[in-house]
Amino acid sequence: MPHATISPITVHKIEPQPGSSFDFGAEIRGADLENITEADASAIINALYENQVILFKNQHTLSPKAQYELTRLFDPSATGYGHGKTLDAKRSILHPDLKTIPHQPQVQVIGNGPVAEFEGLKNITLKHPHHRTFHKEAISDEDDRENTRFYRWHIDAALYDLEPPKVTSLLAVKVPKTEFQTLRYDDGTGDEVQLSRGSTAFVSSYKMYDLLSEEDKAFVRGTKVQYAPHPYIWMSPARSRSDGLGLISDNLELPNDQLPPIDESKIKILPMCWKNPVTGKLALQVHPSAVQALHLADGTIISDLKEVREIVHRLQRPGIAPELVYAVNWEEGDMALFNNRGVLHTVTGSFLPEEVRIFRQCNMAASEGVVGPDE
Ligand SMILES: [Fe+2]
């Protein structure tokens, strides 16, 4: 990495639209992502942990290798994709959504529509995740073009064996520009958000923590979350709430004897709050769909799935209020990096089969575990 003591990089906070009040996100200007100096690297790392989502414009020509190196800046010892090889399991709910770039296997292609050739992948068909494949009840076909949902609020993490990636990068290669959609929560609140079709929605898990009562803050600081073994296979028959924030408890999850072999030592029990390495702030950071049990500070274990999910949903729901959602309105060449240990994110939108959209995504299983509130 070239030496330079002063970086030309500048940080510009994203201005929320009127009526919106999210307090994170920034555009980074002046970065040459193919030639990152040490000063640039520390500017980028600080910008990410202070703003949670950072956006670089006009990165059309950035190579998959440079994207990998940029993502690895945050964790130089990490080498492998965040889900490891678990995506090979055909029953995983993540399996249909991702295609691996052969010459840079930490980088995945996601999107929609037929693609003749892209980075060594030939004649692939990408499929944008549509909420009807995951939510218990879907928007009607006649309303579907104008309306959408949060597909699935999540952290990018295997949550079994591997450590949650520190950051994820997303490069918008091809973006069909169409009209805005109304994103509906459909949970009886009347909440909705206007967003550009296919926006990626983010919320701050620091804000999610800050919104809690003092009693709830003490609860989440002392509680640990146990994730299901092979969570994306385990949850595959289950269906989501209409707000995309966790699953409905209909006893559809696969029992252990229908999962791949389980190594108890690989089951993840993680703090409910994760500490920001630069600001020290606490994020209420839970993957709501993969949760299986809660371990309370007094030693109690809550393992009734319905109760576990009700607790987690009550704690997280205020943090996804419409005014707190930063929906990235993608333009081709946009490269976003986000703090995967401090935000939740979800895809939105629905596309026609012929609408072509291509993104490159990269994250890596971290070389170290998450940092809880007391560490
Ligand atoms: Fe993701």
Image (cartoon, rainbow, N blue to C red):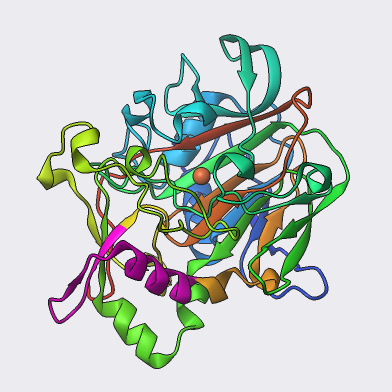
Residue 116 visible in image = yes
Indicate the quadrant where residue 201 lies: bottom right
Number of on-image labels: 0
Q: Is residue 309 magenta?
A: yes
Q: What x and y, as percent, mark residue 113?
A: 71, 22
Residue 178 or residue 187, whichever sits in front: 187
Q: Residue at x 51, y 58 (%)?
A: 344
Q: Residue at x 34, y 46 (%)?
A: 253
- Left or right of 6 in this view: 274: left
Q: Is residue 331 magenta?
A: no
Q: Residue at x 87, y 40 (%)?
A: 178
Decide: is 303 above or below 45.
below
Indicate the quadrant where residue 321 lies: bottom right
Which residue ends up furthest to the front in the rendered image? 250
Which residue ends up furthest to the bottom in the rendered image? 214
Decide: is 286 above or below 331.
below
Q: What x and y, as percent, mark residue 353?
A: 74, 25
Residue 44 visible in image = no
- Left or right of 27 in this view: 228: left
Q: Which quadrant: the N terminus? A: top left
Q: What x and y, as percent, mark residue 22?
A: 66, 71
Q: What x and y, as percent, mark residue 172?
A: 68, 35
Q: Which quadrant: the C terminus? A: bottom left
Task: Write the start and end of the magenta stretch as one range.
Answer: 292-316
Residue 310 or residue 181, whichever sits in front: 310
